[in-house]
Amino acid sequence: MVKTPSPCLNPSAQGTPSYDVVIIGCGVSGANIARRLSAYRLRVAVVEKAADVSFGTSKANSGIIHGGFHHPKKYLKSRLEIQGNWMFDRLHQELGFPFKRCGIIVAALHEDEMKAVEHLYWQGRENGALGLELCSRERLLSLEPQLSPEVVGGLYAPAGGIIEPYRFVFALVESALTNGVHLYTNWKVVDAHWNTEKKEWRLVNQEGGSLSARFVVNAAGLYADEVSRLFGAEEYIITPRKGEYFLLDRLTPVRPERVVFPVPSALSKGMLVIPTVEGTVLVGPTADPALSKEDVATTAEHLDIILEAGKRLVPGLNRNDVITTFAGLRPVLGEDFYIEPSTKVPSLIHVAGIQSPGLTASPAIGEYVKDLLKAAGLELTEKPDWNPCLPPRPQARNLSPYEWDDLVQNDPAWGHLVCRCETVTEAEIVEAIRQGHTTLDGIKYFTRAQMGRCQGAFCTYKIIKILMRETGMSYEEITKHGETSQILRGAL
Amino acid sequence: MKDLYYDAVVIGGGAAGMAAALEIERGGHGVAIVEREDFLGGILMQCIHAGFGLKVFKEELTGPEFAERFIEAVLQSSIAVYLGTTVTKLVPWTATNGGGDLGREQEKGVSTSPFPRWELFCVSPEVGVFRILTRAVVLAMGCRERNRGNIRIPGSRPAGIYTAGLAQRLVNIEGYIPGRNIVIIGSGDIGLIMARRMSWIGCTVQAVVEIMPYPSGLTRNIVQCLDDFGIPLYLSSQVTNIFGNHRVEGVEVTPMERGVLIREKAFRLSCDTVLLSVGLVPENELSRTAGVELHPSTGGPVVDSRLMTNLPGIFACGNVLHVHDLVDWVTEEASFCGKQVTQWLAGKMVLRQVPCRAGANVRSVTPNKLNVEEDNPLYLRSMIVANETDLEVRLDNRVIKRIQKSHVQPSEMITLSLGKKELEGVREDSVVELALLPHQ
């Protein structure tokens, strides 16, 4: 049976463990803040209501490291976007998550749109984005030959890139845990009390468990407004805005090399064509109000619109290459990010309304929140033994035959191919489980098994068997994403 | 890294792979089967219902019983079998790639022939990564199921949505019940058989929802799996939404008239499980990356009269070539393929071939070329449902054969043979066309 990856994942919370900082929510913001704070001599915990980290907003987004030209300079988010973008090379070196600076293109399909493109160019220059170019039709088509022959010109942002958002969160969390941060999953904050005497918050979860914290960071994504209410802090409302996507098979003949944006509208950056860092193609997202914070259903009307919009930019996109569709929610709160200490209650920092470009900005958000905590009185002493690096983690799909053979000779599980579409071996599934990913979706996001063209038709039962063997879980405990999402409903 | 040599390598150890390998071995050539599962038999092993072998063995067998006859024969032959082994890459052999220990391997079935054409990279837990050099490759990887994303059913993404084949594996081999209250989307054969199977284990099957106005599975399965159990079949209907955040809670079904959804007639069925049986796709990812040309109608390789693809020495048979409805046809086609491989390895050339294509009301014809000198088994699929139909074979617009069909429908494959006699008078630029013409 497998050991938990680190004693820091779900440590037994007897009594009320006390922390210097508790972060609520382990999406990309929470994970970045936790990892940043792990560099100091602090007791830090992250509490997450879902069964795994990155299961909320951070899971289903475009995975783009933005180029810093979409928003005006007056916004905090523009500054954090530029700063965050610069931080990715080093994070990539330290943590090894998939990341590529492939560049971003904004393609104008009509002369009238070039005015808006020019505006983006100057806006980006003002923000401090590096390397922006205004492109003629000829330059744009030479950069991206898959583009529609209708393009008249556009913008090129070479600093833009792509990542796998959940893998980024997983790596940050692993790094934070390695450096002593505690993570509690399935831990939903249902109550919070300020103890004036001890000057600390007491947080209570759904099962009556509790933690105490000198400082609390509210990084609860879609639920930041509800968390704020629990603390008796500022009243605000997070509106979920839905984005639906298509995912195309890695064998599609029309995968562009760069992220292709249309000219943005007032409401959103528009529907784009994204070559994902793992070789598939993403088309989307829409931007429509969601019915609720749980509503990640796709709709027939929008799915047709997305593909048509994608085809205007990259005409070769084909319905036959679609392997799945999904939707994610943006937590919308006004125009800008809301990252501020509460003025109503002590020792609470809001990290709310982190919609696009939240993923790009997230490392800078970690830095910014660290500074806010310091300003609020948290003393920061660097740990001399802080380790910023994760060990390299091989993946069968990227190995040469000789490297792969060496791994099998040491561990036969490397020779057992579990997911044929994405070339994932048993050894990689076991590693995911050892890192604490014990739902089918968690294993999927860690390894890509079930993510390919057959969408798990061949490998799901194999993964279930490995999961049961490695953890001792019974068949009834196997879920897709925790809670009541059981896969099996009985045995013969 | 180890190198091995065989005259021929068969990728896939299911019905097609075993039948082809047995023929190649009978022809006196060294042959290996590479199978990614830990057992031979392929998907047959999870098909524990009866109905296999009526044509080949003239008796009604279960899938594993049918497979067993071939497995016995393979194990008694000199065919080398690599189980739990996945082919990760298929590329042309080049001398500069090394060459390895040719001729030194003492494995079963190793030939001393010095002219490999292809190399296969394989991986298994026991051996690690190794390379097989070979003169001929038979693609026999079968097919996979189309999934929810392929048919773009909107809605949420809860647990409880499975392809029928995955559910079949979970129930029949692993012994688990994936759900209790089931709606099946699509009336493909596996879905129909799972409707019966789930009823037998005490689950409720609410309905089978089929988008076409006619069933897409065999008539015998509609009768034996739905009618006998009183399971409703909604034809001309589409599942237009799936509900439930964590586990499936229900689906929305919308009837169609003349191919258009009638929104106001939509209704909801409660269920905790959705099984998808919405068609099969030949599994050609390996072939595609090797450069095999695929046919847009079948999804399988374009093949000549020998079932050889556009790449010399690479052959295809069974469901990887085109999806069959009976394993008996798979076996017949694969044996034919094995014989062709044997002849090709012996250096026998086909002198004259004539292209063969789908005409009126025909979706696809396999193979895509005919041998003018020999008998050619042909498989075709109808695009129409009709009684009293003529299957017409035309050579350059001249009818050379006419077969009366009392009933045709897309789900039932039509087979025939065309030989030297019928193909007399072909010219350099001749074309054979097959059409289905219903009586007016």
Image (cartoon, coloured by chain):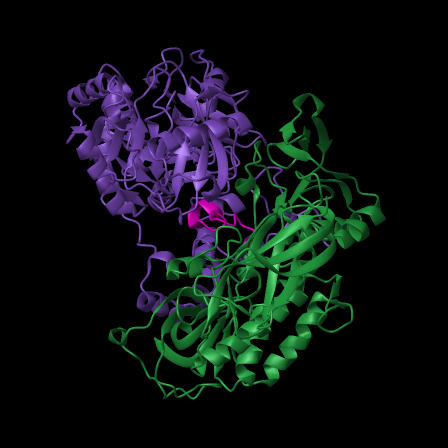
Q: Residue B151 appears at what percent x and percent y?
A: 56, 40
Where is A261 relative to A35, above or below? above
| Chain shown in green | B
Q: Is residue B18 visible?
A: no
Q: Check the picture and name the quadrant holding the C terminus of chain A.
A: bottom right
Q: Is residue B107 left or right of residue A97?
A: right
> Magenta part of the protein: which range?
A443-459
Q: Is residue A109 left or right of residue A320?
A: left
Where is B73 relative to B274, above or below? below
Quadrant housing residue B287? bottom left
Residue that appears at 71% across and 36% down: B271
Q: Is residue B189 visible?
A: yes
Q: Residue A424 appears at what percent x and percent y?
A: 44, 56
B400 or A15, nearer to the observer: B400
Q: Is residue A446 magenta?
A: yes
Q: Residue A384 appears at what percent x and percent y?
A: 22, 44
Residue that appears at 52% across and 33% down: A187
